[in-house]
Image: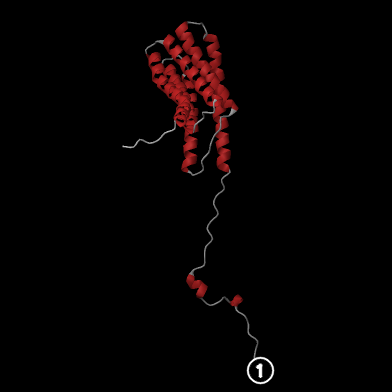
Amino acid sequence: MVKPMTSPKMSVETRRLNIPNGITVFRIFLVPVVVWLIIADEMRWAFFAFLLAGLTDALDGYLAKKFGWQTELGAYLDPIADKALLVSIYIVLGLSDHLPVWLVIAVVSRDLLIVGAIMLSWMLERPVKLRALFVSKVNTVFQIVLAALVLGDLGLELGLAQLTQITVWITGALTVLSAAAYLVTWLRHMATYEAEPAPVKQPSLSSSRGAPRRDQRVKEPAHGS
């Protein structure tokens, strides 16, 4: 059996390109770990696991930009990993009364709204590629900070209740603003598509062979004059 010839240089380059994606996959596997630690009331370890997830997020982004290892797969995996971690933590903290229910509903509803809008545009054959808006980036930062404050306060007893409460209201306001901004962007995109013009009705074969209309007949000159 003849083995396919492979280039050592190509093999090394392929491994390098997969390093950021591998780190992102590791962060995805951290999601159930953090959720289980919160459910088990191991808030200290949940806080450290959440910090580890944040470090991996910064690391894979740094490697991808520093060495040009961006891939199409990574462009999809990275936001999926971030949303899976944040949404899972918010749901569990909300169910355990560590976060207000209204904030959890707002965070989850915003993400469902964005995903539903993108899917609807694909179904209507009007695909939209939503870029990260500035308000969305700020919102994500506050969501991460709020999760870290809650887990850190519960696990390390830092006495951050007042700061946490303020961050809750800021995060809620940014979540609503971010959802509204994405909705406006999506509506503008969908409005750019005009309705297709109605097809022009072609004359039937029988009518084209029929006698000409009265106004189409050419009068012949009279003979014998």
- Residue 171 lies, with reference to residue 74, above or below; the image says above
Q: Amino acid at mark 1?
A: Gly
Spot occupied by residue 132 in the image (x, y as percentages of width and height): 56, 29
- Residue 108 lies, with reference to residue 159, above or below; the image says below
Q: Residues within 10 Å of mark 1 (few under 14, many from 20)?
A: few
Spot occupied by residue 40 in the image (x, y as percentages of width and height): 37, 12
- Residue 154 lies, with reference to residue 117, above or below; the image says above
Residue situated furthest left in the rendering: 1
Secondary structure beneath label 1:
loop
The residue drawn where x is 53% and y is 13% is: 165
| Residue 219 falls left or right of residue 198 | right
Spot occupied by residue 33 in the image (x, y as percentages of width and height): 39, 17
Which residue in the protein does label 1 denote? Answer: 224
Can residue 83 be seen from the camera position used here? Answer: no
Q: Which of the two residues, 107 or 141, is positioned nearer the viewer here?
A: 141
Q: Which of the two residues, 160 or 125, is positioned nearer the viewer here?
A: 125
Spot occupied by residue 75 in the image (x, y as percentages of width and height): 50, 30
Quadrant occupied by the N terminus: top left
Residue situated furthest bottom in the rendering: 224
Quadrant occupied by the C terminus: bottom right
Q: Which of the two residues, 222 or 146, is positioned nearer the viewer here?
A: 146
Scheme of colours in the image = secondary structure
| Residue 32 falls left or right of residue 60 | left
Can residue 116 be seen from the camera position used here? Answer: yes
